[in-house]
Image (tube, helix red, strand yellow):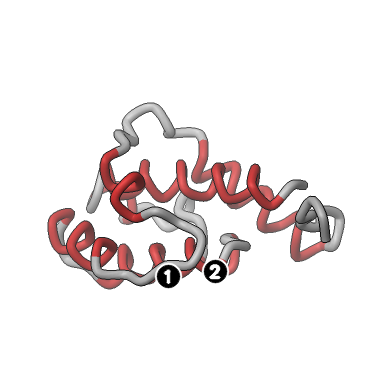
Amino acid sequence: MKKLDQQRHELKALRYLLENYPESVRNHDTLPSREDFQIFDNRLIYDALMAAKTKEEAATAIAALDLEETEVESFLRLGGQFYHTYPQLVIERGEEFRAGTVKLVVPGE
């Protein structure tokens, strides 16, 4: 799987979780775990999201992150209402990465 594709899927899942926060993180059966996220920046966003008590607090914490590969302003501007399938996709891909059936590919490396 191309790293860029994985990053897009993970960011869409995170944006959905933020858009529907805090309801989106209440059901732990449908919530991806930190380990399901393969991209380091996305793990940091996940940590900020999970530590927050309100949607506004989560957005503020995410805005304060110094990320290497993610433009935070663009992430926060996106709407996440249509990304409801992405958290489950991240869970499924996380299982595949841990099982070794999928690996990240960075073109040119």
Along the line of sight, which residue is nearer the eye, 85 or 105? 105
Drawn side of residue 93 relative to residue 100, left or right: left
- Residue 41 location, x and y as percent? 48, 65
- The residue lying furthest to the front in this view is 108
Q: Residues within 10 Å of mark 2 (few under 14, many from 20)?
A: few
- Residue type at numbered disc 2: Phe
Drawn side of residue 63 relative to residue 35, left or right: left
Drawn side of residue 106 relative to residue 80, left or right: right
- Residue 47 location, x and y as percent? 38, 71
Q: Residue at x 81, y 57 (%)?
A: 103
Dot 2 and dot 1 residues touching (CB under 8 Å): yes
User: Looking at the image, how many numbered discs can be counted on the residues?
Assistant: 2
Quadrant in the picture for the C terminus: bottom right
- Residue 73 location, x and y as percent? 29, 50
Dot 1: element: helix
| Residue linked to disc 1 | 44
Q: Residues within 10 Å of mark 1 (few under 14, many from 20)?
A: some
Q: Residue at x 75, y 65 (%)?
A: 98
Drawn side of residue 57 relative to residue 4, left or right: left
- Residue 5 location, x and y as percent? 65, 42
Along the line of sight, which residue is nearer the eye, 8 or 36? 8
- Residue type at numbered disc 1: Leu
Residue 58 placement: quadrant: bottom left
- The residue lying furthest to the right in this view is 101
Q: Which mark is residue 88?
A: none
| Residue linked to disc 2 | 40
Q: Residue at x 46, y 41 (%)?
A: 12
Q: Residue at x 60, y 52 (%)?
A: 91
Dot 2: element: helix
